[in-house]
Amino acid sequence: MSAVAATLAVTELPELTGSRFLTSWELDPVALAFVVLLGALYAAAVLKLRRRGESWPVARTAAFAVLGLGVIVLATMSALMVYSRVLFWPAAVQNIMLDLLAPLGLALGDPVTLAGRALSPSGGRRLDAVMRSWVVRLLTFPFVSSVLVLISELSIYFTSYFQTALREDGVRQLMHLQLLLSGCLFVLPMLTKQEMLPRWCTHPIRALLVFIDGLFDSLPGIVVMLSGTLVAGNWYAAHPRTWGPTLQRDQQIGGGLMLTIAELIGLPFLGAVFVEWWREERRKAVELDARLDRELVPVAVGVASGGSAPQDTAPTLGEPARGAGADAADDADHATGVESAVGAAGAEATDDAPGAAPAGPAGPAGPGGPTSPAGPQMVRPWWETESGEVAERVRRNTGRGARR
């Protein structure tokens, strides 16, 4: 749109009301093409997974489409765009939505993980190489990305950048793309399943970084609200209105909305990080349980007369091994099983050694008295004698740790 056409359109705008806010729309071909392209790529990746028999969460698709692409459409083609040339506060809301809210919706859709799964093995390796490159690592490093977002917003409002964007459509579209990409640099690595952050950036650290970033995001709104210098003052003064707030009041409203929206977006962002944290802990627990199931191999239990018999199977995680005395007293049924095993072993020993006296019941040996026949030799499970996370987990689950 030329400067003359923009001026004519601005002077003809009626007062902004609630109904006009809902019905005023302006087509942005570049923004529409961008949204259609992103949506088509995302949908193609989801369909490719389904054709292979793999699933993709519907909630992630909805977040990408509604909170991501939908917010981009709302910010670039709704009344926020139409009235941004005569009022500052719609432009401020428009920019904060592109900088904070749209990146959050796109990140909740996790397009990086989706692309990695949908691509061929060679394509997935190339994508992983790009994500692990030093350029991406530097731009997505938590403190670097937070500073980039802050510099991006301040450079827009306190240079001639914003006023030029109001006059030139190409510059405005470039500004919108800059806001969207700078916001994604911080939000996307925090929520994606791909490892784009340093190892020390665990989920507790990410929650802390999101809280700190919320403080950074509030600074532009505070500065704009309290500034005595009008943002794009020459442009708005050249396009006077007979309705609405004064220029200074308009800027204060815009700064206040920037601050409010930034803080409100921080709450669901922090909640999303906690959800990812919970999912990661649950995944680790499932992996540990599977590891325990693989490592809990049968433990030998020997029953012999004057020696040890070949090892038999030992209890699994749900059926802990029991000692010869105390555990038998705890469970009468198990003690009966042990006695039966001993009797069977004694019978076998009698058959192998002719003339041997039958095994009688074992009794306590008095001082200087005869010793009782050899009883069953129980092998202590490895988790009762070893230390470490796996052994400790087994002891907690079997309840044997307290009786050691």
Image: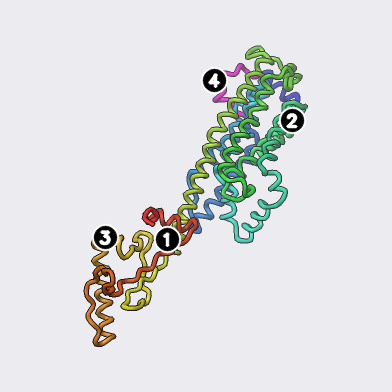
Q: Is mark 4 on a helix, strand or loop?
A: helix
Residue farthest front in this picture: 368
> Where is residue 98 shown, x and y percent of the image?
63, 34
Residues under numbered marks 4 and 2 in contact, where contact means CB atoms less than 8 Å apart:
no
> Where is residue 320 shown, x and y percent of the image?
35, 61
Query: How far separated are the C-alphas under marks 3 and 2?
Result: 78 Å
Q: Which amino acid type corresponds to the residue marked 4 in the rendered image?
A: Gly
User: Which is nearer the N-term, disc 2 or disc 1?
Assistant: 2
> Where is residue 293 shown, x and y percent of the image?
42, 61
User: Mark 4 = which residue?
Assistant: 18
Residues under numbered marks 2 and 1 in contact, where contact means CB atoms less than 8 Å apart:
no
Of circles 3 and 4, the one toward us is 3
- Give residue 384's mark: 1
Query: How far separated are the C-alphas under marks 4 and 2?
Result: 31 Å
User: Mark 2 = which residue?
Assistant: 155
Q: In which quarter of the image is residue 351?
A: bottom left
Q: Does the magenta stretch include residue 296?
A: no
> Is there any visible trace of residue 91 in the rendered image?
no
Of circles 1 and 4, the one toward us is 1
Query: How far separated are the C-alphas under marks 1 and 4?
Result: 71 Å
Q: Which amino acid type corresponds to the residue marked 2 in the rendered image?
A: Ser
User: Mark 3 = which residue?
Assistant: 329
Query: How far separated are the C-alphas under marks 1 and 3?
Result: 19 Å
Q: Which amino acid type corresponds to the residue marked 3 in the rendered image?
A: Ala
Q: How crowded is mark 1: few (under 14 residues within 10 Å), some or many (20 or more)?
A: some
